[in-house]
Amino acid sequence: MHGSKAHGIGSTETVRHFHFAIVFEMQDELAPEGESSANFFLFDYLEKHGVTCYTGAKMLEINDDGIVCEKDGVRCEYKGIQNVVLALGSKPENPLQAMLEGKVGKIIVVGDAMKVAQGIDAISAGYRAGYYI
Ligand SMILES: Cc1cc2nc3c(=O)[nH]c(=O)nc-3n(C[C@H](O)[C@H](O)[C@H](O)COP(=O)(O)OP(=O)(O)OC[C@H]3O[C@@H](n4cnc5c(N)ncnc54)[C@H](O)[C@@H]3O)c2cc1C
């Protein structure tokens, strides 16, 4: 990717690995749930490397020569993009719960299967589940 024009969408961490990058983030701020100390160095890095970051910019479409997003209710098109990196987050994946329902006594769902969060949240929920069984 060296020297290429890349557009990271969603993850401000991901964009560190590209030389020319634009971040499109649909939330109103970058990494709102990031650790403040990690964010400090991340934002410093982005600023020093001249990375343009658009917040409140929702990605709608990727086409042959660019992307389309919506910012402040206005549809915007960015052309001449060579690479698009999607780093859009995660949502819980928990098909086992429905399969086990009625077959076992009690089901406690913890961690990212319940709600995608930080490692410490999964550890803490696992601890509480074990404690109260
Ligand atoms: C890129 C990234 C960076 C992150 N960085 C941080 C960070 O810096 N600090 C932090 O605190 N958190 C971080 N997190 C979040 C953290 O990794 C998760 O919150 C945490 O791992 C959730 O733990 P978990 O046990 O619920 O799920 P997981 O760690 O995902 O473990 C679930 C396990 O279940 C296994 N599994 C799934 N289905 C089955 C099945 N049918 N049978 C058997 N096994 C199965 C999977 O293979 C997996 O190993 C990060 C997450 C990502 C994706």
Image: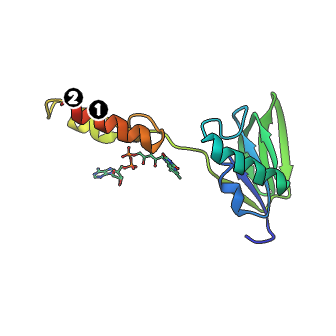
> Which colour scheme appears in the figure?
rainbow
Q: Count of labels shown?
A: 2
Residue 102: quadrant of the picture: top left
Q: Is residue 7 above or below residue 125?
A: below
Count residues near mark 1 (Cα–Cα under 10 Å), then give few for <14, some for 14-19, many for 20+: few
Q: Residue at x 18, y 29 (%)?
A: 106
Residue designated by label 2: 132
Residue at the image point whose x is 70% and y is 39% from the top: 30
Label 2 – label 1 distance at C-alpha: 6 Å
Looking at the image, the residue that sits furthest to the bottom is 2
Residue 80, compared with residue 121, is above or below; it is: below
The residue type indicated by label 2 comes to: Tyr
Most foreground residue, 12 or 62: 12
Q: Residue at x 76, y 72 (%)?
A: 2
Whether disc 1's CB lies below 8 Å from ligand 1 is answered no
Location of residue 101 by image quarter = top left
> Circle 2 — which element?
helix
Q: Callout 1: helix, strand or loop?
A: helix
Q: Quadrant of the C terminus?
A: top left
Res 25 → quadrant: top right
Whether label 2 touches label 1, CB < 8 Å: yes
Q: Is residue 26 left or right of residue 73?
A: left
What residue would you read off at disc 1?
128
Q: Decide: few, some or many residues near mark 2? Use Cα within 10 Å; few <14, some 14-19, many ≥20.
A: few
Residue 116 screen position, x and y as percent:
47, 38
> What's the amino acid at mark 1?
Arg
Percent of width and height locating residue 38 = 64, 47
Q: Which quadrant of the figure contains the N terminus? A: bottom right
